[in-house]
Amino acid sequence: MTVRSLLAVGALVLSLTALTALTALCPAQYALLAQPIPVAERVAVTEWRLPATSPPFAAILFVPATWLPVATLKAVVVVGNVLLLALLVRLSWRFAARRPDTATTPVPVPVSVLVAVGLWLEPVFRTVLHGEISLALACLVLWDLTRPDHALGKGFAVGIAAGVELTPALFIAYLLVTGRSGDVRAGLTALASLIGTMLLGALVLPRSSLDFWTLRVFETSRPGEAWSADNQSLQGLFARALHTPEPGVGWAVACVVITFAGLWLARRAVVRAGHGTWGVPAIALTALLVSPVSWSHHWVWCVPLLAVLLAEGRWRTAAAVALVFSARTFLLVPHEDGAELQLRWWQQVLAAPYALLALAVLAALAYAAHRRHRRRRITDRRLAAVRPLPLSQLPASNSSASTMR
């Protein structure tokens, strides 16, 4: 044990103690930790009787959670999410720092310090306190995507994650559109894995599966009120900006455009520019934008995004992104009785920080792609201008060699 390691562990303990104290001092804000989960009818839980919104396969996976007492389950979930954050930090840095010609760069800061700081990113904070699975899904997807192309069953974990929550399914499309043989093979494996989760759900819960895949999957309002400031997707942004609970065609068209733009940017970053580290963040942000509901805890993909920025030496940009994901500005706007539908123009920015940041990142990637394309064209023109003439076009020589022939 060195002084450095002791300080790192101390930072993590101090962070966890502060988090616990904040929870105890603000019981109204974080009351979910203290509420027992009653036995539900038709899979509706908590006092608000929220309906189940995930595929039936997810219900099958989490049956073992009912075997533990509630107090024990809460402790397991909190500790498990802290460990998952540590894993996500390591996976993110391994992914962000890899180069085609160099070995993986070790994390420059102790993982426990990064975990201590990362706990205060609002998406991570909300995931830990509310017992969400966002960190688990992010780890599952990122672990699978960082495996070598020849790894056995690469893509299987991505399909499992999509079977639990549908949002990661866009990573399957990403693997298929890159066009590289290893990615396409992984994409097909992920697609087969996703279909397998659907078949397993249909086998164990046939009625629920039929109901979900034919009706519930199309009910975009089923997860909750789309206009809520907690919803950081495009649907939430459009609903609040247009002052209507049903954003309609405008939102749908924007989702289609953003989906194709995100896939194009990710493919261009990976195939054309060779910047594979930006492909995954681009797809993650695109998926969160076009999902009908992306609660704040779904945005734990801010951790890989920050890792990519830090690995490229963009410290100021990383600090600004970390500030956005820590400021919790959407909690400052009115929430009572549909007040989000009456926000003023300056409150719209406070209510949609993650969505606006994601759009800014995609716009920056598009601008960078445009600049690379423009530089390539200029370089090609210059090379064409200085290229030597073919031998047949050279002027006739008056040298003595021609006379000797």
Image (cartoon, rainbow, N blue to C red):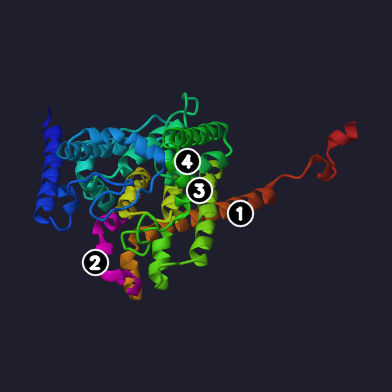
Query: On residue 110, which mark appears?
Result: none
Question: Would residue 234 be counted in the magenta stretch?
Answer: no
Where is residue 77? Give x, y as percent: 22, 39
Q: Circles 1 and 4: CB distance less than 8 Å?
A: no
Query: On residue 332, which mark appears?
Result: 2
Q: Is residue 405 left or right of residue 372?
A: right
Question: Under tag 2, what secondary structure?
Answer: loop
Amino acid at pointer 3: Thr
Alpha carbon distance from label 3 to label 2: 38 Å
Q: According to the image, label 1 marks what residue?
A: 378
Mark earlier in primary sequence (3, 2) = 3
Q: Is residue 3 visible?
A: yes
Amino acid at pointer 4: Gly
Circle 3: is it few (<14), some (14-19), or many (20+) Cα within 10 Å? Answer: few
Q: According to the image, label 3 marks what residue?
A: 214
The quarter of the picture where residue 6 lies is: top left
Mark earlier in primary sequence (2, 4) = 4
Residue 253's place in the image compared with 103, above or below, is below
Residue displayed at 37% across by 54% down: 223
